[in-house]
Amino acid sequence: MSVAKAQEFIDANAGGDKSIKPYGSYDEVFADSDVDAVYIGTPHTFHYENSLAAIKAGKHVLVEKPATCNAAEFRALLQAAKEKNVFIMEAMWTRFLPISLEIKKIAESGNLGNPVVLHADLSGYFGIDKLPLTHRILDPKLGGGGLLDL
């Protein structure tokens, strides 16, 4: 990653918009006083270290799911965020869908009684037969697979 490559991307994809600042590293983003919050969308196994660096720099964090690869890492991020007085949240988009909010409202109303069983599916086509084993969706070293990715 370099400022030159970032500028090349801006030029190719945003018409060279001069209001978009290129950065050569995450640390440069985290150090910028004009940046209030960051979205962490790196491979799963980097979420903890990237989020922690942002929190230590005083940035609010929205981190892609899974926020971390285990509960201990997330507890550490919550503690760090509390100490720095910044907000951290896992980017679980389904939580804010109108249908999800309505289902939650109905379930909590008690009108249907107590739940007995719940079945939910979330799927997507990744074309895994065409992906190399080093792809983030397949590589366990990158947190790949259904457990963490979905």
Image (tube, rainbow, N blue to C red):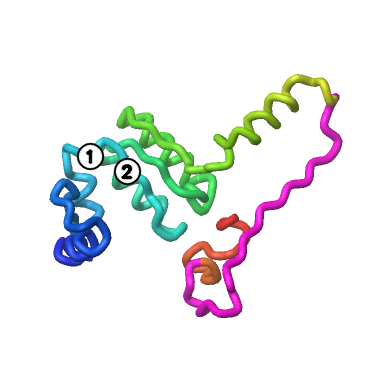
Residue 78 appears left or right of 119: left
Q: Residue 35 bears which disc, if any? A: 1
Residue 56 appears left or right of 64: left
Taking the spot 50% from the left edge, 79% from the top edge, the residue there is: 132
Work out how far the residue at label 1 is from the one at label 2, CA to CA, in angstroms.
Answer: 7 Å
Q: Given contact means CB atoms under 8 Å apart, are the residues at marks 1 and 2 in contact? A: yes
Nearer to us in this view, 149 or 102: 102
Question: In x, y percent, where is residue 39?
Answer: 36, 46
Residue type at mark 1: give it: Val
Q: Residue 92 bears which disc, if any? A: none
Taking the spot 65% from the left edge, 58% from the top edge, the residue there is: 123
Q: Which residues are magenta?
A: 113-136
Disc 2 is placed on an element classified as strand
In the picture of the structure, the residue carrying the numbered disc 2 is 38
Residue type at mark 2: give it: Val
The image shows residue 19, relative to residue 134, as above or below, that is above
> Which quadrant of the rendered structure holds the C terminus?
bottom right
Q: Quadrant of residue 107?
A: top right
Question: In x, y percent, where is residue 61?
Answer: 36, 40
Dot 2: few (<14), some (14–19), or many (≥20) neighbours within 10 Å? some
- Magenta stretch, overall SS: loop
Residue 77 appears left or right of 103: left
